[in-house]
Amino acid sequence: MRRRRLLSLVGAGVAGGLAGCGGSDEMAASIEDHPAATGLAEQPRLGELGNHVVLAFEDPSCQRCAAFHEDTVPKLRSNLTEPGLGAYVVRHYPVVYPWGGPASRALEATFARSERAYWDLLGHYFETRGQFTADNVLDRTETFLTDDTDVDGAAVVADVGDGAFDDAVEADVSAAEAAGLGETTPVVLLFRAGEYVTKVNGSVSYEVVAEALGVTE
């Protein structure tokens, strides 16, 4: 299990043309030097680092993030991560609805315990996002984790209440701010063979990602 530390298409108008929930193209850089990729190896991810990277800053309360997961992430799995061509990495960026903050901290607490449960919980948030409010999100999270995963939901909620993962979420927010990403979700940074290509905002299509990274279905 990977645990977290505390802490154009260029010129084609893609970044400005996709709407996000909530926009400057930051400096080009290798992934090792890019401010958004600080501590990359410790973030939740599918696939292995070392080649292409799709780095997504997401808010669990965001409708467009949910659309990205429904429409694009399955193709990233089948065409990028599972064939060993690259990685899809998530950082939490709760800037949309108030319940996204505690949900992001619950995701961090879950990831520290189980990667599988992390992805299950993230999917649950997106699939049932209309059921959550700032007042009920932790109760509903505890019930889901206890009933549908092998993680102790009460322990996750206790960690959130104690602020045990506040710094982990703040590290993601700080990375977004350092890269000048704006308050938009999802915001997706694309690295081709370790080199920054572009940033795209909104429910990014797989075709945009594939063209930027030079991969096909």
Image (tube, helix red, strand yellow):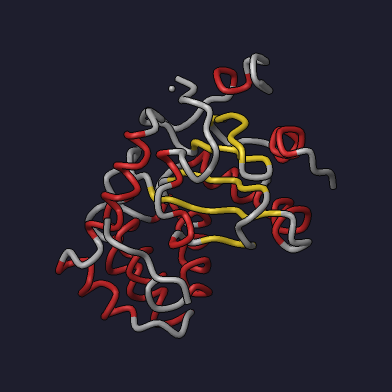
Residue 155 % position (x, y): 26, 80
Q: Residue furthest left?
A: 162
Counting from the top left corner in percent of width and height, residue 52 is at 67, 47
181 and 68: which is toward the camera? 181
Q: Is residue 192 above or below residue 42?
A: above
Residue 9, quarter of picture = top right
Query: Left or right: 152 with respect to 17?
Result: left
Residue at 34%, 83% in the rendered image: 152
Q: Count the marks: how many?
A: 0
For the residue pair 200 and 139, the one nearer the viewer reads as 200
Q: Find residue 153 and report its image quarter.
A: bottom left
Q: Residue furthest right?
A: 217
Q: Is residue 167 left or right of residue 187?
A: left
Q: Where in the figure is residue 7, as x and y percent of width and height? A: 27, 55
**Residue found at x 62% / y 31%:** 197
In the picture, measured across the screen, residue 127 lies left or right of residue 11, that is left
Residue 32 vs 138, above or below: the answer is: above
Residue at the image point whose x is 49% and y is 53% from the top:
90
Residue at x 63% of width, y 50% of height: 70
Left or right of 168, for residue 89: right
Where's residue 185, x and y in %? 45, 37
